[in-house]
Image (cartoon, rainbow, N blue to C red):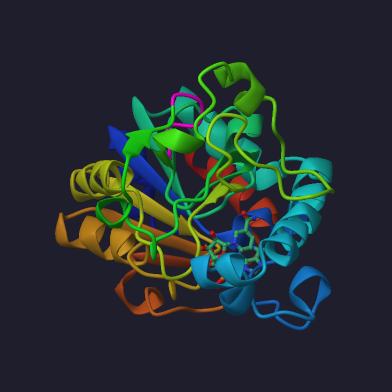
Amino acid sequence: MIAPKLVDRLHACQKLVVFTGAGMSAESGIPTFRDRFEGLWANYDPEDVATPRAFRANPQFVWDWHVQLAETVRKSQPNAGHRAVARMQDRIPQVTVITQNIDNLHQDAGSKDVIELHGNLLRIKPFEDPENRPDEIDNLVICHVCDGYADYEKCDPYAAKEDFHSIELRAGDVPRCPGCSALIRPDVVWFEEPLDLETQERAFRIADRCDVLICIGSSLEVMPAANIPIRARWGGAAIIEVNPEPTSLTFYADAFIQGKAAVELPKLLKLVWA
Ligand code: NAD
């Protein structure tokens, strides 16, 4: 599966990064983004639905599409791969999961340090329209309920934060912030949006300094997330890739484990630490 030298490297590893993409959750029943012609993605290209542009044009449609995805995510459970990743915490002093997934399954499996590069579908936030930037709004304040940009003339001083926190991504009309009436959206990073800067910098910093990075189930086509394994490589880390298909990383990897996450990760755990 992997060379004895790499097994030694994992035994000696002090700082592990596990970098994951949609393939990590495929066996939990959440279709990968590239499975374009199946299930969830069959009728719509996510690049047309998951954008601020699409939400501005038709918030209800975009909300409903995410509700459908959230229903799938709520029904799913961590698979043996997520559990194997969580168990690596018992063997290595510092394990950080850097995930592109928005499904919360690493946390559900017990991973403690999870950096969510693309947000989390089970959280919501106000829609801050990039076409309606703060410096273009008169009377700008930060809403005391949703912490989004707001017009103070529209803010209800009696609305409470709890009213906002009780809102969920569920079927029905697109909700509005009880304080400033901003439309509510899922707390995920859509296409055409930048990553949260602090989150990105923390992920880069940790990847730059890790000893080993295991890349699981990512096509490495979404930037800037796809830079993370390469940054780890530049920093001198050993790279192990787990994927049924080769990717642009495979050539640079110290080991390519060809197969499914839920099958190969428990095997890797057993081989190295049994
Ligand atoms: P991707 O869909 O582009 O690629 C999936 C990769 O997983 C492919 O390389 C594929 O060969 C591999 N794969 C398929 N089945 C696998 C398995 N059983 N085990 C291991 N690997 C498997 O995924 P991406 O690179 O993560 O980019 C997709 C984007 O869409 C991300 O930004 C992500 O946020 C989002 N997304 C998230 C989820 C989720 O949260 N579960 C699901 C779909 C898409």
Q: Residue furthest front?
A: 153
Residue 177, how many percent across, how many down?
Answer: 60, 36
Q: Residue 197: within the magenta?
A: no
Residue at 48% in and 41% down: 272
Q: Visible in this render: residue 258? A: no
- Indicate the quadrant where residue 2 lies: bottom left
Q: Which quadrant does ligand 1 occupy?
A: bottom right
Residue 223, how many percent across, how many down?
Answer: 36, 69
Residue at 51% in and 50% down: 127
Residue 9, how many percent across, how many down?
Answer: 30, 45
Residue at 48% in and 56% down: 189
Residue 24, how many percent across, how many down?
Answer: 61, 55
| Quarter of the C terminus within the rendering | top right
- Indicate the quadrant where residue 192 lies: bottom left
Seen in the picture, residue 227 relative to 165 is either above or below; the reply is below
Residue at 79% in and 42% down: 74
> Of residues 221 and 183, which is closer to you in this image?
183
> Of residues 87 and 271, which is closer to you in this image?
87
Identify the magenta region: 144-148
Is 159 on the left-hand or right-hand side of 20? right
Is 114 on the left-hand or right-hand side of 110? left
Q: How many marks?
A: 0
Q: Visible in this render: residue 209? A: yes
- Indicate the quadrant where residue 222 lies: bottom left
Seen in the picture, residue 218 relative to 178 is either above or below; the reply is below
Seen in the picture, residue 134 relative to 159 is either above or below; the reply is below
